[in-house]
């Protein structure tokens, strides 16, 4: 018994030591990711404002794509994989992430938004923050296991800071690595990095969009079934988005051998699509349309148009993230199916906002927590249903090709039978 008590006491001493260690490192990570996300948000606000003030900037889209392509081709080949490079380094730590990843992805994403590509921002925030926090590896002399945790915390901090969702950010950094596995060893560092990262961004004077769902009806059996149907629709849409993005990217790579020409041609196609539809509502982040999905009935094809613009932009090689466009697609899709299902349009918009993201990224817990943080606790039950069902219906492929499958989503499928190629 004395040996057991001694072991317990030693274990608690180790726990305190780890808490102190990761509190310090987590705060450093949060400060770096929060500051870099603030820089990104300011840059994108500037680029978006300039583009909306001077519509002629859209005509520069092909040249902007070419410039971004040239920059990455000659200066950034080692970091072009973006988020997939980060996931690979966590799975199998090898080399310190080059600092130029942060600089190049900021430049590339700013060009994308300035000229009118349909891309997001979370990928940029995560890459910037993680490239910066990996500088801590040689300074603090971290081993491979600790470095892996630092990279996970960098993802959490960047995600939390750019969206203002520390709980979702914490879980995203742990959940996105592999389907069916949650990395508990990084829980505390990811929590500290996400919380501090969010606070630092706010301290720099940045604010996030506020969404409101005024009415959340009591859950009944019929509303439960409606929520399940909605979640299935969100999951199928997420699968289409991920698959189409990868296949367009593969097609461009197969047909165009010189990489800088891919976003150049993609820019021409996106510019032609803008002229065809006669509106610019499907380019950039699309925040105004996301907000409108919570307040008014939108055209039912908005989600499909945004899906097409985004998969083409990302597949052609424009830099940016996928998540904000997924919010747009999900919110407008939820808005579109509201007349069919017995749920309020604002609630379905919120469910789609979180659900399509959860299905495409294979992160149902992060999606659920994000909905609760952005829309309020009363939406939690509906958001949980939407995110979990979307996750199940989206298949094993997702927007991140380096995301691994540890366990099948389905009890009737053996892991060795899985085929996650896209």
Image (cartoon, rainbow, N blue to C red):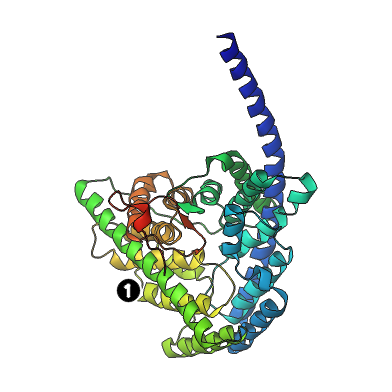
Residue lying at 60% horizontally and 54% vertically, measured from the top left: 92
Point out residue 129 in the picture as x, y percentages from the top left corner. 67, 57
Horizontally, is 217 left or right of 302 in the view? left
Q: Is residue 53 visible?
A: yes
Point out residue 287 in the picture as x, y percentages from the top left corner. 50, 67
Point out residue 90 in the picture as x, y percentages from the top left corner. 60, 53
If the image is split into quadrants, where does the C terminus sit? bottom left
Query: Which residue of the protein is positioned furthest toward the top in this rendering?
Result: 2
Look at mark 1 in the image and give the residue it sits on. 300
Point out residue 142 in the picture as x, y percentages from the top left corner. 72, 45
Residue lying at 45% horizontally and 70% vertically, measured from the top left: 289
Q: Quadrant of residue 338?
A: bottom left
If the image is split into quadrants, where does the N terminus sit? top right
Residue in the foreground of this view, choosing between 73 and 357: 73
Say above or below: 72 vs 10: below
Residue lying at 69% horizontally and 66% vertically, measured from the top left: 101
Residue in the foreground of this view, choosing between 175 and 3: 3
Q: Quadrant of residue 65?
A: bottom right
What SS does tag 1 mark?
loop
Q: Is residue 196 visible?
A: no
Count of number-bearing discs: 1
Q: Local crowd at mark 1 within 10 Å, few (<14), some, or many (≥20)?
A: some
């Amino acid at each position: 018994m004395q040996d057991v008590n001694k072991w317990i006491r030693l274990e608690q001493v180790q726990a305190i030591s780890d808490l102190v260690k990761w509190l310090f490192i987590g705060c450093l990570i949060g400060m770096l990711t929060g500051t870099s996300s603030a820089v990104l948000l300011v840059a994108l606000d500037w680029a978006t404002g300039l583009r909306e003030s001077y519509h002629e900037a859209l005509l520069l889209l092909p040249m902007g794509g070419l410039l971004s392509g040239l920059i990455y081709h000659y200066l950034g080949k080692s970091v072009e994989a973006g988020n997939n490079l980060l996931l690979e380094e966590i799975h199998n730590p090898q080399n310190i992430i080059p600092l130029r990843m942060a600089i190049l992805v900021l430049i590339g994403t700013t060009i994308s938004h300035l000229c009118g590509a349909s891309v997001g921002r979370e990928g940029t925030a995560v890459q910037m923050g993680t490239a910066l926090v990996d500088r801590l590896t040689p300074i603090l002399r971290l081993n491979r296991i600790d470095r892996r945790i630092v990279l996970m915390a960098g993802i959490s901090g960047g995600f939390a800071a750019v969206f203002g969702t520390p709980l979702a950010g914490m879980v995203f950094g742990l959940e996105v690595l592999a389907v069916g596995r949650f990395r508990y060893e990084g829980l505390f560092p990811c929590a500290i990095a996400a919380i501090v990262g969010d606070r630092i961004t706010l301290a720099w004077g940045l604010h996030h969009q506020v969404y409101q769902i005024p009415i959340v009806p009591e859950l009944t059996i019929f509303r439960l079934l409606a929520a399940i149907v909605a979640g299935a629709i969100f999951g199928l849409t997420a699968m289409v988005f991920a698959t189409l993005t990868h296949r367009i990217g593969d097609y461009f790579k197969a047909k165009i051998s010189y990489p800088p020409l891919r976003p150049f041609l993609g820019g021409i196609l996106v510019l032609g699509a803008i002229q065809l539809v006669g509106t610019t509502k499907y380019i950039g982040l699309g925040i105004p349309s996301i907000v409108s999905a919570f307040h008014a009935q939108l055209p039912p094809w908005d989600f499909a148009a945004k899906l097409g613009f985004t998969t083409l932009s990302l597949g052609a090689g424009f830099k940016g993230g996928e998540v904000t466009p997924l919010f747009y697609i999900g919110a407008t899709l939820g808005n579109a199916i509201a007349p069919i299902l017995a749920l309020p349009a604002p609630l379905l918009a919120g469910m789609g906002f979180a659900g399509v993201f959860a299905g495409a990224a294979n992160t149902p817990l992060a999606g659920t927590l994000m909905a609760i943080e952005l829309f309020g606790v009363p939406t939690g039950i509906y958001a949980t249903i939407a995110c979990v069902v979307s996750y199940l219906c989206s298949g094993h492929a997702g927007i991140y090709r380096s995301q691994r499958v540890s366990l099948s989503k389905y009890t009737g499928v053996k892991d060795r039978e899985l085929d996650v190629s896209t």
